Amino acid sequence: MKRTNSVLLKLDRDTAAEVYYFGDYVRELIRRKKPNIVKILIRNYPIRSVLQYLRQNGKVKTGKEYVTFIAKDGVEAKIFFPRKNNHDKWDTSFSLRDDAKTRDFTINAMYLSISKRASSKHIIDFFNGRKDLKERKIKSIGNPRARIKRDPLYLLKAVSLAAYLNYRLDSNLFYAIKTLSENITKVDMGDVREHITSILLSKTPSKYLRILHNAGVLFHIMPELDMCYGVRQNEQYHKHDVFTHSILACDNTEPDLVLRLAALLHDVGKPQTREETPEGKATFYSHEVVSSRSSKRMLKKLGFEKEVISEVCDLVYLHMYNYEPGKWTNAAIRRFIRKAKITAEDLDKLNTFPLFLVRRADRLANGYPHKEVSYRQERFQERIVDIYKQSNVFTINDLDINGRIIMDTFNLKEGPTVGHILNYLLSLVIDDQKLNKRKILTDKASDYLSEALK
């Protein structure tokens, strides 16, 4: 950072250029936080001359919105030039006030000369950003309705910034978002995903997911989750409706994207599966199956990576396991271990196993005082460890037979049939570990093929 500062400070001192820190950098400086991004605005000096100077002192990448400068110390700075309006091209003759009008929120439109960086007293603040920081408020520069109409993503930017800082929205900004919430449908889903991810990884995602619901935005981007609002559950087990329960479950996981998505969506299928008994009790049979399918559809639409979608949907599908000590046999435990993909490396840290963390979040979000982990869950985990250590086979690779042997023995070509046979044999051995002998497995495979050919 010292090298970057010295390069830019020299430009400010030795030329007519005016070099300012601005945006996120100044905001975090005032908040006494370490800035994640170095943002610089340069005015009153030809752009070509600035770029020439920067190239002499580091690497330069020119983009549409800004220039990236990487000095020899490796620190990356984003270099901006003034614009009078959002649609204008760069023009270093425009004033700081002109440029400030193009910025998104008051707390991001403050400037500090690089020569004055040691003192926040010299911060240039045209729109009372420091006051809004003190009041922990996200406020639009200019008319928020006009901003949203010009850039529909603006409404989601406001909420994700509020979530990142744990601030509130200015009332005029909130009502503009609510009035124009449908505009979010005009935004590329990749941009939506980026801001939803930011909200989910914030300190208290439930607060801002509720804002998205109240403003009508959630209905357009995650309708399956929005439909959970007001869906009543059995008060014996759940104090809250499905929506509130889901967003609180999200709060009760670590800031990990897969965990938070799984906790948020684990009950998203309940509105579609809800039925009521004559006694007035609500049932949600197979909601985990519907929840998993809905999650896959929703996450795919938002453009999440296939690996993330797969992990989330598996957690959602498996979260309803119901361990009963007197009924679950050793074979049932082994089947669960296989299904949940528990490995030997997981045994010493089952409390942090993803599926159990989602289950913990589910329990903590039911609205009633409980231990984080139930006594039954503790016994279940102990039994998983015991059964795992007593067993030898959990995957196809553990079988005393393989695909090549199957193909040679039964004159089969490589293909799905071989996989079906191996999976069948694995299911037998999971139930009874004594069957894991090549002769027995070969006989079982012969029986399987004979039955398939009938």
Image (cartoon, grey):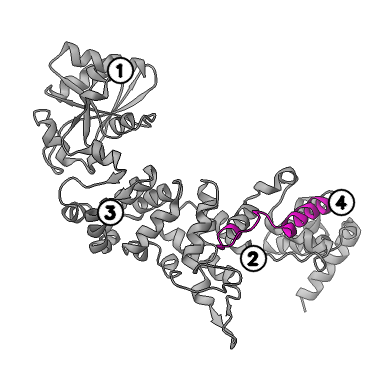
Cα gap from disc 4 to disc 1, whole angstroms:
62 Å
Question: Which of the two residues, 230 or 14, is positioned nearer the viewer here?
Answer: 230
Q: Secondary structure at mark 1?
A: helix
Cα gap from disc 4 to disc 3, whole angstroms:
56 Å
Q: Earlier in the sequence, mark 2 or mark 4?
A: 2
Which residue was labeled with disc 2? 320
Amino acid type for the residue under numbered disc 1 = Asn
Q: Secondary structure at mark 3?
A: helix
Asked whether the residues under the numbered discs 1 and 2 touch, taking CB atoms below 8 Å apart as contact, a structural biologist would say: no
| Label annotation for residue 390 | 4
Q: Secondary structure at mark 2?
A: loop
Which residue was labeled with disc 3? 155
Cα gap from disc 2 to disc 4, whole angstroms:
26 Å
Residue 369 falls inside the magenta stretch: yes
Q: Position of residue 303 (x, y in %)?
A: 42, 55
Q: Secondary structure at mark 4?
A: helix
Q: Earlier in the sequence, mark 2 or mark 3?
A: 3
Residue 289 appears in which quarter of the rendering? bottom right
Question: Which of the two residues, 143 or 332, is positioned nearer the viewer here?
Answer: 143
Q: Is residue 153 left or right of residue 335?
A: left
Q: Is residue 416 above or below residue 253?
A: below
Q: Earlier in the sequence, mark 4 or mark 1?
A: 1
Magenta span covers which residues? 363-388
- Badge nearest the viewer, 4 or 1: 1
Residue placed farthest to the left in the image?
93
Residue 384 appears in which quarter of the rendering? bottom right
Q: Earlier in the sequence, mark 1 or mark 2?
A: 1
Cα gap from disc 2 to disc 3, whole angstroms:
36 Å
Which residue was labeled with disc 1? 5
